[in-house]
């Protein structure tokens, strides 16, 4: 098995980490995040959707438009009721931890609006293919977040 293949166990562990993080911010009774696809077999990618009244996240993991050669994490949708409260930064910290644990090389934000563009640029994401998509090496983002001077 190559490192680009994602096992059901890896998918479930990532979902559990996302739900644990979400619960620490918004303690809903039921887990907020779930899979968009079946996880019963190995695959090249999977998607996670999490939404409640106070937030919206849609994430892709694995081989995506960012890279067909290595695993990446794409933030396809992000929104929190309270903006500028640190939730986006905390999400990036979680995603860099996941990236390091499971060998995801790139993190991307797609189809940005003015707010998410400013957010991406604040963390040194680079434009990718157009000014609507931004990417960064997961390890570079981790180092930026560790310095904490954002």
Image (tube, rainbow, N blue to C red):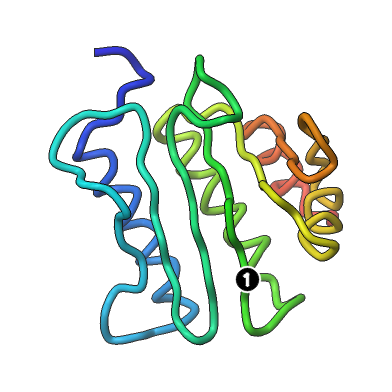
Which residue appears at 67% of the width and 47% of the height?
109
| Observer-nearest of 33 and 36 | 36
Quadrant assignment, res 29? bottom left
> Could you tell me residue 106's position as x and y percent?
60, 31
Which residue appears at 82% of the width and 54% of the height?
117
> Could you tell me residue 58's position as x and y percent?
49, 58
| Observer-nearest of 126 and 144 | 126
Quadrant assignment, res 131? top right
Q: Residues within 10 Å of mark 1 (few under 14, many from 20)?
A: some
Please tell me how many numbered marks the rendered image carries. Answer: 1
Which residue appears at 53% of the width and 40% of the height?
73
| Observer-nearest of 70 and 141 | 70
> Could you tell me residue 19's position as x and y percent?
36, 65
Image side of residue 63 versus residue 114, left or right: left
Which residue appears at 32% of the width and 54% of the height?
36
- Quarter of the figure with the N terminus: top left
- Quarter of the figure with the C terminus: bottom right
Quadrant assignment, res 44? top left
> Could you tell me residue 143's position as x and y percent?
71, 38
Local SS, label 1: strand
Image side of residue 70 versus residue 133, left or right: left
| Observer-nearest of 55 and 84 | 55
Image side of residue 77 versus residue 43, left or right: right
Residue pointed to by mark 1: 79
Is residue 42 depicted above or below 84 in this figure?
A: above
């Amino acid at each position: 098995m190559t490192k680009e293949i994602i096992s059901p166990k890896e998918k479930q562990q990532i979902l559990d980490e996302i739900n644990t993080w979400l619960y620490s911010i918004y303690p809903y009774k039921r887990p907020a995040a779930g899979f968009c696809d079946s996880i019963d077999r190995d695959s090249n990618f999977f998607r996670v959707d999490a939404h409640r009244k106070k937030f919206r996240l849609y994430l892709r993991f694995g081989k995506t438009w960012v890279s067909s050669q290595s695993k990446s994490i794409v933030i396809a949708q992000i929104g929190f009721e309270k903006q500028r409260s640190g939730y986006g930064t905390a999400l990036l910290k979680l995603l860099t931890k996941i990236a390091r644990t499971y060998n995801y090389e790139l993190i991307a934000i797609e189809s940005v609006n003015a707010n998410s563009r400013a957010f991406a640029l604040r963390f040194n994401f680079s434009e990718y293919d157009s000014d609507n998509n931004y990417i960064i090496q997961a390890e570079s983002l981790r180092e930026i977040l560790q310095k904490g001077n954002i």
